[in-house]
Amino acid sequence: MEIPDIVIGRLPIYLRALTRMAAEGMEITSSHEMGQRLGISSAQIRKDLSHFGEFGKQGSGYQTQYLIKQLRRILRVDGEWEVALVGAGALGRALAHYDGFRDRGFRISLIFDNDPAKVGTLLNGFQVYDTARLGELIRQRSTTLAMLAVPAEAAQQVTDALVKAGVRGILNYAPINLVVPDGVWVQYIDPVVHLQRMTYYV
Amino acid sequence: MEIPDIVIGRLPIYLRALTRMAAEGMEITSSHEMGQRLGISSAQIRKDLSHFGEFGKQGSGYQTQYLIKQLRRILRVDGEWEVALVGAGALGRALAHYDGFRDRGFRISLIFDNDPAKVGTLLNGFQVYDTARLGELIRQRSTTLAMLAVPAEAAQQVTDALVKAGVRGILNYAPINLVVPDGVWVQYIDPVVHLQRMTYYV
DNA sequence: TAGATTGTTAATCGATTAACAATC
DNA sequence: TAGATTGTTAATCGATTAACAATC
């Protein structure tokens, strides 16, 4: 009954591919066609989707737009999540300016940095607040998601503050493992880890 | 005999944790202690390592520095890989300035962009070259790794040029699936995918 | 109708875990 | 020695795939 994490993990990939296909004008697709694009077996795609309902038609396949809509609903990205960004260094600024969040369900709406030279400035139209005010402001706005773009040394401390303020999901760009209580989710992005996963084979 | 991809995928995580532990002054550790930090069972860590040799001592555990050295060797990051960066937008610039590559085995040494206003400028001390010269320069320097920080629309085309020039591993920041021939590896970084993996649970 | 593709079941495959002898 | 931890085997668990009836 419980849906495996690994299945949930693939849904955003399906959603991304379908959105692309829709943009290319494809109104209908099939598990076989999706699998070809993604390097995944068609059986796996059908099995994954079957955890959530029946979205296709025998003989013809899936209506692209309809499946997109369903996946957005399942993943709960049919609305817009407000995301806090901690760290306004080079990476933080790049994230703040990235325009790919908006139409996929997210918006950075609260930015923090502990550098007095940055506090009070605007970043993509948003105030940069002092990290000291993190708890206060996140609680006030009931923000539940955050991105961490601070040095590794500060990451755990900031995480503790985020969790205490009610954040439930953290996208961590710092190259360090975070300790969080049950009920808080962390995803990691570390380019070096990804590069090191390729050098073994190259 | 063949080592599973999923095992290779965990080694960089072990390496990162061990490096952290070493920095904290820990000279010895155990599979149990590592597992606690990473939220992984000690049995899995021992099993993973056993694919490559025997690195520990019964009763005491692993010498941190020795295990780091072995993992670096296994992953082939005991030297320094030259990496090409394609795309000098906000993200590309953040990557070019990131100082966390160097001591983990990588160095961005070749930067491309197709914006005439950027071509010829310096980025972290390196020339920005016209993307039109990508094939020529990558071949000349025998670069085998690349990071892709270009818009989704350009990603496949740039990928084809990279592969043709001899690149064997691509770290793709564009939110799109790439098609590559056998023998070429791709790793994906898409913050939205990671965020969407959490919203289901939050 | 004939061809295609779904959703699902059962079989296969592979990964994780538990347990323990070996031994530091 | 007594306690601790490794490396490995076997058992368990879970994920993927193959196959096909249902049906558009």
Image (spheres, coloured by chain):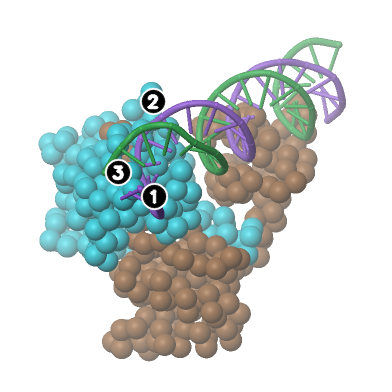
Chain colours: A cyan, B brown, C purple, D green
Choose the circle earlier in sequence order: 1 or 3: 1
Mark identifier at residue A81? none
Q: Which residue is mark 1?
A: A31
Q: CA distance from mark 1 to mark 2?
A: 23 Å
Q: Which residue is mark 2?
A: A2
Question: As shown in the figure, which amino acid type bears the numbered disc 2?
Answer: Glu
Pick whichever, A28 or B87, lies toward us: A28
Quadrant where the image shows the C terminus of chain B: top left
The answer, for residue B94, to whether it is visible in the render is no
Q: Secondary structure at mark 3?
A: strand
Q: How far from the left and from the top, in percent, is residue A100?
A: 25, 60
* Figure quadrant of residue B40: top right
Q: Is the residue under label 3 in contact with that under label 1 (CB below 8 Å)?
A: yes
Badge 1: residue crowd in 10 Å (few <14, some 14–19, many ≥20): some
Q: How far from the left and from the top, in percent, is residue B41?
A: 58, 29
Q: CA distance from mark 1 to mark 3?
A: 9 Å
